[in-house]
């Protein structure tokens, strides 16, 4: 009698748990299935559009992306948590980064200031901390040889020389130095260095090289040079107090029009000086007036304001415990004059966060909100060294890290790599077992109950030379013992290249991986016990 009663109680309890489980499975599937490739495509088409110019950290394009994300969070009814600096709350967590750059740079010709990286640009990281006034002299092509000499009638000691790029040639295109169609030693980089050495030996202090480009071409060259030099300007949280020393022999590239202004003449008269060399093979260096210009190119730490974007969905009975879902929304901007739209890196992760937020917000609206709270956060500065997530985790977490259950981080899930091509139904998981065996099991079960992808742990191996575990934003939480999963589909031919566009995203695959993240997040947010930190794997 007692045995039968216990069996009945056990059966009833089992049936109740099973019924609950079945309901939960049905609910998670119901909302996971609302995750839509069409929604992902709509958001990504804007986030990875030319209008945002590659979303470089601190750029106008990055700010436009932040505004878009914040509006989507607001439309979904997510709560703002970041301080707005006025006693209220907002969706933006603002902070400053600092990068080496030119704080104040100009060339003054009379009362006119010429604009840096528009009217002229430097050769390298030129630094002139204080304004210098210097006499300018036209030195033709800056060549001194047995057959052609630009220094016969000029004195360049203590002055800046304006020299034409390249070497003299006649109207038919033959070079005067070689008397043939072949270039001489005065061309290219070696020729430029030879010109500089001759001028330095004669006492020259500064160089202005006149390009052969028209005004439109020159502006393009200036923009490209700005992009190239910006790569050397690493960002950091701290402003340096050490001033840079002035550069020896500073060199700038200028247009023909600016050369004419510097030499106090008209563009047509300057053209005549150049054309006369072409016609006669003789220097006109002594035929231009000297003038005086003022130059400054002060380098230092330039503040760059940027922001993380976050939206909070409050939980029910376990709302003080928080699940974090992250992706970085910055990319590498414009390089060599080409926009790098970063559709996969990490437009795919960014828009997945938006779609996950929409699905969970819909569940809450219909009375099925998560038990634990969820903070959806898109971070800035990943491409500069994981700086946005580092700022949040190390300096200003809006949710205490001890209350943060785990971080599900999404970075590049829209393409396939050569190791799996043409197969699409896979995803790399990194970090799932490093701090919590329970999180790893939840992830495996979520996959078995949903998309049934191949879960590839190749990059989870601590011996893997790519070290991807340390290369995306989850790591800034893992180092604080917050369990993490990093979702990733590998590097492809368009990684950090201008071809990373929306047209190449595999939306059915992208949708399914986002659904997998949802299944995992649902279980973490709704289970009775918080996942345990029970391992410490490298």
Image (cartoon, rainbow, N blue to C red):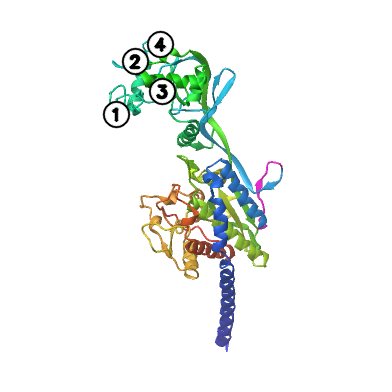
| Sooner in the amino-acid sequence: mark 2 or mark 4 | 2
| Sooner in the amino-acid sequence: mark 2 or mark 3 | 2
What secondary structure is the stretch in magenta mostly built from?
loop
Q: Which residue is mark 4?
A: 154
Contact (Cβ within 8 Å) of mark 4 with mark 3:
no
Magenta stretch? 76-86
Q: 479 or 470: nearer the eye?
A: 470
Q: Is residue 45 above or below residue 251?
A: below
Q: Which mark is residue 149?
A: 2
Q: Position of residue 373 (x, y in %)?
A: 62, 58
Mark 4 residue crowding within 10 angstroms, few (<14) / some (14–19) / many (20+): some
- The CA distance from mark 3 to mark 1 is 19 Å
Residue 419 seen by the camera = yes
Contact (Cβ within 8 Å) of mark 2 with mark 4:
no
- The CA distance from mark 1 to mark 2 is 20 Å
Q: Which mark is residue 409?
A: none
Q: Position of residue 342 (x, y in %)?
A: 49, 49
Q: Which residue is mark 1?
A: 181
Q: Position of residue 500 (x, y in %)?
A: 46, 51
Q: Secondary structure at mark 1?
A: loop
- The CA distance from mark 2 to mark 4 is 11 Å
Say whether residue 65 is left or right of residue 425.
right
Q: Secondary structure at mark 4?
A: loop
Q: Is residue 145 above or below residue 431?
A: above
Q: Which residue is mark 3?
A: 164
- The CA distance from mark 1 to mark 4 is 29 Å
Q: For the residues carrying marks 1 and 4, which lies nearer the camera in this image? A: 1
Q: Quadrant of the N terminus?
A: bottom right
| Sooner in the amino-acid sequence: mark 1 or mark 2 | 2
Say whether residue 501 is left or right of residue 320.
left
Q: Position of residue 517 (x, y in %)?
A: 52, 62
Q: Is residue 61 above or below residue 287?
A: below
């Amino acid at each position: 009698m007692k045995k039968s009663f216990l069996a009945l109680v056990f059966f009833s309890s089992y049936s109740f748990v099973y019924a609950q489980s079945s309901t939960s499975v049905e609910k998670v599937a119901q909302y996971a299935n609302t995750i839509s490739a069409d929604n992902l495509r709509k958001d990504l088409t804007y986030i990875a559009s030319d209008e945002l110019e590659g979303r470089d950290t601190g750029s106008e394009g990055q700010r436009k992306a932040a505004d878009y994300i914040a509006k989507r969070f607001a439309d979904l009814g997510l709560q703002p948590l970041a301080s707005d600096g006025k006693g209220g709350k907002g969706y933006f967590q603002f902070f400053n980064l600092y990068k080496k750059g030119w704080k104040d740079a100009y060339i003054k010709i009379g009362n006119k200031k010429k604009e840096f990286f528009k009217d002229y640009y430097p050769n390298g990281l030129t630094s002139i901390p204080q304004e210098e006034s210097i006499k300018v002299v036209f030195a033709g092509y800056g060549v001194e040889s047995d057959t052609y000499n630009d220094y016969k009638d000029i004195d360049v000691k203590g002055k800046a020389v304006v020299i034409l790029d390249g070497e003299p040639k006649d109207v038919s295109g033959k070079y005067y130095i070689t008397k043939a169609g072949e270039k001489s030693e005065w061309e290219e980089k070696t020729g430029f260095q030879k010109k500089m050495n001759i001028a330095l030996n004669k006492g020259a202090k500064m160089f202005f090289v006149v390009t052969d480009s028209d005004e439109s071409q020159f502006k393009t060259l200036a923009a490209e040079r700005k992009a190239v030099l910006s790569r050397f300007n690493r960002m950091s949280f701290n402003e340096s107090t050490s001033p840079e020393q002035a550069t020896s022999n500073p060199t700038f590239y200028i247009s023909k029009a600016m050369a004419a202004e510097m030499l106090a003449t008209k563009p047509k008269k300057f053209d005549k000086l150049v054309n006369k060399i072409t016609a006669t093979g003789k220097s006109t260096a002594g035929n231009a007036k000297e003038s005086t210009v003022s130059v400054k190119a002060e380098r230092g730490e330039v503040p760059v304001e940027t922001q993380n974007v976050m939206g909070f969905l409050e939980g029910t009975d376990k709302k003080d415990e928080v699940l974090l879902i992250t992706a970085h929304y910055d990319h590498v901007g414009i390089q060599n004059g080409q926009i790098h739209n970063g559709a996969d890196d990490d437009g795919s992760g960014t828009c997945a966060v938006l779609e996950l937020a929409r699905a969970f917000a819909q569940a809450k609206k219909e009375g099925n909100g998560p038990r634990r709270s969820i903070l959806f956060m898109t971070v800035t500065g990943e491409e500069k060294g994981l700086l946005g997530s580092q700022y949040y985790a190390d300096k200003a977490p809006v949710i205490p890290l001890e209350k943060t259950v785990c971080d599900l981080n999404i970075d590049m899930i829209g393409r396939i790599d050569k190791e799996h091509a043409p197969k699409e139904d896979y995803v790399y998981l990194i970090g799932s077992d490093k701090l919590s065996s329970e999180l790893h099991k939840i992830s495996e079960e979520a996959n078995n109950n949903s998309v049934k992808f191949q879960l590839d742990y190749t990059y989870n191996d601590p011996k893997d030379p790519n070290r991807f575990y340390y290369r995306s934003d989850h790591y800034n939480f893992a180092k604080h013992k917050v369990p993490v999963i990093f979702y990733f589909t590998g590097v492809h031919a368009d990684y950090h290249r201008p071809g990373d566009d929306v047209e190449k995203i595999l939306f059915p695959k992208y949708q399914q991986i986002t659904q997998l993240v949802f299944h995992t997040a649902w279980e973490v947010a709704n289970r009775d016990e918080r996942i345990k930190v029970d391992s410490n794997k490298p």
